[in-house]
Image (cartoon, coloured by chain):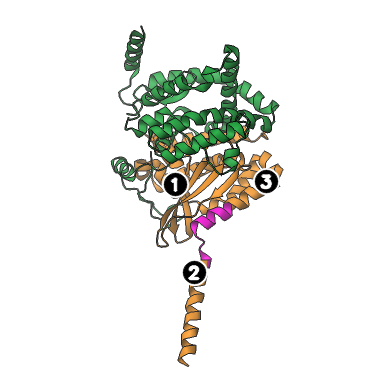
Chain colours: A orange, B green
């Protein structure tokens, strides 16, 4: 009787553990799954590669849910973030998101035909802040590392920075953002971001090679 | 004469130095001038030629050209590995050179990569950095683009030792140098388009990316942690994220970001 109770308890515990793990993919597995899925979709559908809007739609659907854009925007603004009010923060995040998604779409299209290598995660299971390494292999050149900085949130693992070849996107925007804020304030930054997005959108509408 | 030239150049640079700019870029005014000049040359000559090269020649051929010059580069990449005390990397790069020059038919096939011997990225500027030489002021060199004082010295050494410079007759050397430049620019077409899209101010964006990239290369992708943290402390104040938009209950990590 006791053994049965024990077995039942163990089973119950295992189920609990299993469901908890099932809800939340490990960060490296998440990156791998999402990247492979998107790259495969791009490879299969030549039209997506030529059509910027379709590509962006794909990224918005598959990739965006795994990014923490508020966190990214806050990091990119640094000290200036605290000077912004709630409405300004919301607009900054929206505009920055649009900009990053377009950039990411271009980069992904450029990398889609290269071989990717997914590195095993070097982190403890208790870590809540990890870096997931992917490498783009290309003949005749050093592999390009793409590092996703990710943190654990209640809604699963979220990316808050991407480093390409050692260049952090967030850090790279910081100087630009701070310069603009110093010259023309938070609203000035919102204005120049949205102006930038409009020009890129107008230029990127045409099919590209 | 050369000394006089340098003295004049330094005086010009000093005159251009701005008081309130980025401390890493004291000659920003001067640099922006050179940057503009480079852009004009690029738009007028380099980019159209590189685009034609990319569109007219099949990737098969372009990759042969890329591999050929990459193989020649491995020779001094190996030298720089050794100068930095990276024995294994040095042996690997010379093994690459040996295999690719022979089985790879003068380097046009990168058989070493297929064998799993990865290419490294080294140059004299990185070696100086590894030896403890700081960046020095950021500089934009005519035609060559982003650099720093340290990397300019490194680039001079790279060019001085460049095996392609020893190609003879001179016409062959010139053609080889031109072909290599066109190939490099063609490979950057995609990147420069992305830069165009991503940056609010291309000059700043490119400068910061260059400085970050060089730092990452000097430490082979692993910049020392205490240095990062120290810099982070002096640079960042705590950032708090209000649950105003998007994802809530978020802890923005005071984390190792290079700047």
Above-or-below relation of A15 to B126:
below
Cβ atoms under marks 2 and 3 closer than 8 Å: no
Q: Nearer the observer, disc 2 or disc 3?
A: 3
Residue assigned mark 1: A72
> Which image quarter: residue A83?
top left
SS at circle 2: helix
Q: Is residue B114 left or right of residue B159?
A: right
Circle 2 marks a residue in which chain?
A: A
Q: For mark 2, what is the residue?
A: A20
Q: Main secondary structure of the magenta part?
A: helix
User: Residue A134: image x %, image y %?
Assistant: 52, 48
Chain under numbered label 1: A
Judging depth in this view, the residue of B80 and A114 nearest the camera is: B80
Figure quadrant of residue A203 = top right
Q: Residue at x 49, y 54 (%)?
A: A120
Residue in the foreground of this view, choosing between B228 and B20: B228
Does the stretch in magenta take in A110?
A: no
Mark in the foreground, 2 or 1: 2
Residues marked 2 and 1, same chain? yes
Q: Earlier in the sequence, mark 2 or mark 3?
A: 2
């Amino acid at each position: 009787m006791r053994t049965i109770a024990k077995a039942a308890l163990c089973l119950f515990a295992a189920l609990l553990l299993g469901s908890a793990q099932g809800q939340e993919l490990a960060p490296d597995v998440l990156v791998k799954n999402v990247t492979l899925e998107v790259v495969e979709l791009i490879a299969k559908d030549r039209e997506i590669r030529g059509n910027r809007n379709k590509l962006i739609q794909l990224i918005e659907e598959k990739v965006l849910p795994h990014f923490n854009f508020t966190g990214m925007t806050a990091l990119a603004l640094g000290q200036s973030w605290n000077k912004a009010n709630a409405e300004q923060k919301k607009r900054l995040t929206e505009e920055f998101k649009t900009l990053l998604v377009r950039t990411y779409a271009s980069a992904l299209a450029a990398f889609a035909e290269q071989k990717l290598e997914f590195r095993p995660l070097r982190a403890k299971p208790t870590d809540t802040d990890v870096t997931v390494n992917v490498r783009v292999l290309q003949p005749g050149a050093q592999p390009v590392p793409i590092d996703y900085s990710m943190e654990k949130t209640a809604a699963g693992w979220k990316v808050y920075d991407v480093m390409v070849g050692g260049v952090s996107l967030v850090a790279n925007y910081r100087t630009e953002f701070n310069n603009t804020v110093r010259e023309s304030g938070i609203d000035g930054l919102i204005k120049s971001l949205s102006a930038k997005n409009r020009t890129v959108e107008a230029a990127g509408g045409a099919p590209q090679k | 004469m050369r000394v006089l030239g340098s003295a004049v150049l330094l005086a010009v640079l000093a005159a251009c130095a701005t008081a309130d700019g980025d401390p890493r870029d004291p000659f920003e005014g001067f640099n922006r001038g050179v940057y503009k000049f480079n852009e004009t040359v690029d738009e007028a000559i380099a980019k159209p030629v590189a685009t034609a090269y990319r569109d007219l020649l099949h990737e098969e051929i372009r990759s042969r050209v890329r591999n050929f010059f990459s193989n020649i580069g491995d020779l001094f990449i190996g030298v720089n590995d050794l100068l930095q005390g990276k024995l294994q990397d040095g042996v690997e790069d010379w093994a690459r050179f040996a295999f690719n020059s022979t089985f790879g038919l003068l380097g046009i096939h990168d058989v070493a990569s297929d064998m799993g011997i990865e290419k490294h990225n080294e140059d004299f500027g990185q070696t100086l950095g590894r030896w403890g030489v700081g960046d020095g002021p950021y500089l934009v060199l005519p035609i060559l683009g982003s650099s720093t004082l340290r990397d300019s010295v490194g680039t001079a050494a790279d060019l001085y030792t460049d095996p392609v410079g020893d190609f003879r007759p001179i016409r062959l050397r010139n053609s080889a140098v031109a072909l290599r430049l066109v190939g490099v620019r063609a490979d950057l077409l995609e990147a420069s388009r992305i830069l165009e899209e991503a940056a609010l101010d291309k000059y700043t964006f490119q400068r910061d990316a260059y400085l970050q990239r060089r730092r990452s290369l000097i430490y082979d992708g692993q910049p020392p942690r205490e240095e990062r943290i120290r810099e982070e402390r002096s640079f960042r104040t705590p950032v708090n994220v209000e649950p105003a938009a998007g994802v809530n209950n978020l802890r923005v990590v005071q984390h190792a970001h290079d700047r």
